Amino acid sequence: MAEASFEEQRENKERFQFGQNWKSFLNVLNETRINEAERSLVEMLSFDELSGMRFIDIGSGSGLSSLVARRLGAHVTSLDFDPASVWCTSHLRDRFFPGDGDWEVMEGSALDRPMLMDLGQFDIVYSWGVLHHTGEMWTGLRNAIDMIRPGGVLFIAIYNDQGWKSRAWWLIKRFYNFLPKPLHTIFAWSLGLILNAGNVLKYTVMLRPMDAIRPLLNYEKRRGMNFSHDLIDWMGGFPFQFATYEALVNYAEAAGLRHERGIKATSLGCHQIVFSKPDRGASIP
Ligand SMILES: C[S@@+](CC[C@H](N)C(=O)[O-])C[C@H]1O[C@@H](n2cnc3c(N)ncnc32)[C@H](O)[C@@H]1O
């Protein structure tokens, strides 16, 4: 069955408007955040520069990762399903690389296989925090895998399966999208404050309060992100799926990829995993 359009999904309250949140994030984007995003991308990919490489950013959101990849020398294709995210990414391109022919920004879906296959294959397929928001995570992952050129890499971030907690998050996100718009921010901040206060209390009892407080103070260390925008994204980000680290690795390995490195989420948050596609000899089922 064909995927419903962004507008249809939004009207049916089945899709969070990520792009609106990213528009607001652009107001706080500065050089420190860009440098932090660059540091984390370089660290995970293990490349100092991406000169001449084809890089696709599936679900580009604000466009920050695409910007970083372009600054590192890659030929970048940015793709997003949400027209406002496409606007944000185009805005960043026009601000930092006006008239650049090596950075294409497109509206489209990670589930639109014929369109994706028409784009060809890429040295780096990057999709951070996206495939679990498509509504069909495994189809999206399959498509992403097939876009890697032999010898290329895939970098994904996918929400951790926390058992019943993930199911509770599904309900929270579903509820958020049913709420009338004026209540969104109040709901997100109220629940966010309760959860964070609970976390600080838990670590205080363990005599390590700074373990909970420090990450909030140094928030931009998380890929240049911002707490208030991530909070809205956590509460509203729907559709929502999740997987264990092992399930992701098993799926990718069965499709012929090799696990290179990763950071396994132990609670709320995303597993970050880098895979490579062997140069030859692998048969993708
Ligand atoms: C949580 S944001 C992550 C943005 C960016 N990758 C980052 O790491 O900051 C998820 C993004 O995925 C996009 N997205 C959701 N479903 C998508 C789909 N089917 N195809 C392409 N992008 C999609 C959303 O519009 C949103 O911009």
Image: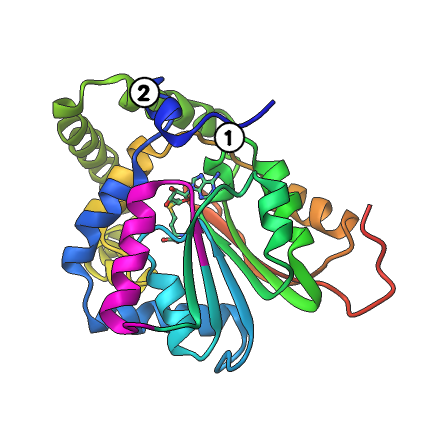
Residue 177 covered by magenta stretch = no
Instruction: Give the quarter of the image for residue 62.
Output: bottom left
Relative to 185, say whether 274 is above or below. below
Relative to 208, say whether 158 is above or below. above
Between residues 110 and 37, which one lies in front from this camera angle?
Answer: 110
Instruction: Give the quarter of the image for residue 81.
Output: top left
Q: Which residues are magenta?
A: 78-99
Going from N to C along the chain, the mark reached first, 1 or 2, is: 2
Q: Which mark is residue 143?
A: none
The image position of residue 141, as x and y in percent, is: 61, 44
CA–CA distance in space, label 1 to label 2: 16 Å
Mark 1 nearby-residue class (10 Å; few <14, some 14–19, many ≥20):
some
Relative to 125, say whether 205 is above or below. above
Mark 2 nearby-residue class (10 Å; few <14, some 14–19, many ≥20):
few
The image position of residue 212, as x and y in percent, is: 27, 50
Q: Which mark is residue 135?
A: 1
In the rendered image, the quadrant that contains the C terminus is top right
Q: What residue is rendered at 87% in x and 64% in y?
A: 281
Q: Which mark is residue 11?
A: 2
Judge: label 1 CB < 8 Å from ligand 1: yes
